[in-house]
Structures are given as C-alpha cells and as structure tokens.
C-alpha cells in the first residue's frame, strides 16, 4: 500500500518481551522494509518499518495490541492514540 508519490517515513516500534521473539534479528520480517534495531535489557525489541501512509502501519500495530508500541514518529503515535480513544468511546 505504499504510495510512490509520497515521501517515505520510518516508524520505530517496540515489541514487548511477550512477543519479542517474532521481531528479533534473523526472524522473518512482516514487512519488506522491517529492520531489527536492538534488544533491550527488559527483553523487548526495537525495530523499524518504512511507510508512506498511516494505514500501512496502524492495522499491524492494532493486531499486536497491547504488545507493540509506536515510539516514533510522534504524529503517527498521536493518530494511533486518537483512533484508540474513538474505539474505546464506541465500546463504552
């Protein structure tokens, strides 16, 4: 779903220790641009994915809730939080 007409951005994501095994170095990536960055002392894994539009990343993050956190970019994180709030308001 990448848009060639849009500039590429890099999402920095954190996988919790519970699911970190799927994102460690050498594991099959979920995205062609997925890159392992580092393992943290707490067992979590930091990785990146290139994207051109939010809808490339957000469904993936939602699928892995609550075990994937968006670290960067901040505007993607804010968009995600807004969508989560709307969803929670719908269910309350």
Image (cartoon, rainbow, N blue to C red):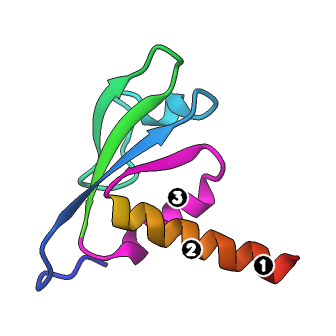
Given contact means CB atoms under 8 Å apart, are the residues at marks 3 and 1 in contact? no
Q: Give yes or no for residue 71 being in the magenta stretch.
A: yes
**Which numbered tag is attached to residue 61?**
3
Pick out the residue farthest to the right. Answer: 92
From the top left corner, tell me how far across and down residue 81 is, in percent: 56, 66
Given contact means CB atoms under 8 Å apart, are the residues at marks 3 and 2 in contact? no
Horizontally, residue 1 falls left or right of residue 84, namely left
**Which numbered tag is attached to residue 24?**
none
**Which numbered tag is attached to residue 82?**
2
Given contact means CB atoms under 8 Å apart, are the residues at marks 1 and 2 in contact? no
Of the residues tagged 3 and 2, which is closer to the observer? 2
Vertical relation: 9 (above or below) 28: below
* Crowd around label 1: few <14 · some 14–19 · many ≥20 (10 Å): few
From the top left corner, tell me how far across and down residue 28 is, in percent: 38, 40
Badge 1 is on which residue?
89
Query: Tag 2's secondary structure?
Result: helix
Span of residues in magenta? 52-73
Query: Tag 1's secondary structure?
Result: helix
Horizontally, residue 54 falls left or right of residue 86, namely left
Q: Quadrant of the C terminus?
A: bottom right
């Amino acid at each position: 779903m990448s848009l060639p007409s849009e500039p590429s951005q890099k999402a920095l994501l954190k996988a919790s220790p519970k699911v970190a095994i799927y994102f460690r170095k050498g594991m099959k990536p979920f995205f062609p641009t997925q890159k392992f960055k580092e393992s943290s002392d707490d067992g979590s894994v930091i990785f990146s994915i290139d994207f051109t539009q939010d809808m490339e990343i957000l469904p993936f993050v939602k699928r892995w809730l609550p075990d994937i956190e968006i670290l960067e970019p901040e505007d993607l994180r804010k968009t995600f939080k807004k969508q989560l709030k709307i969803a929670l308001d719908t269910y309350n």
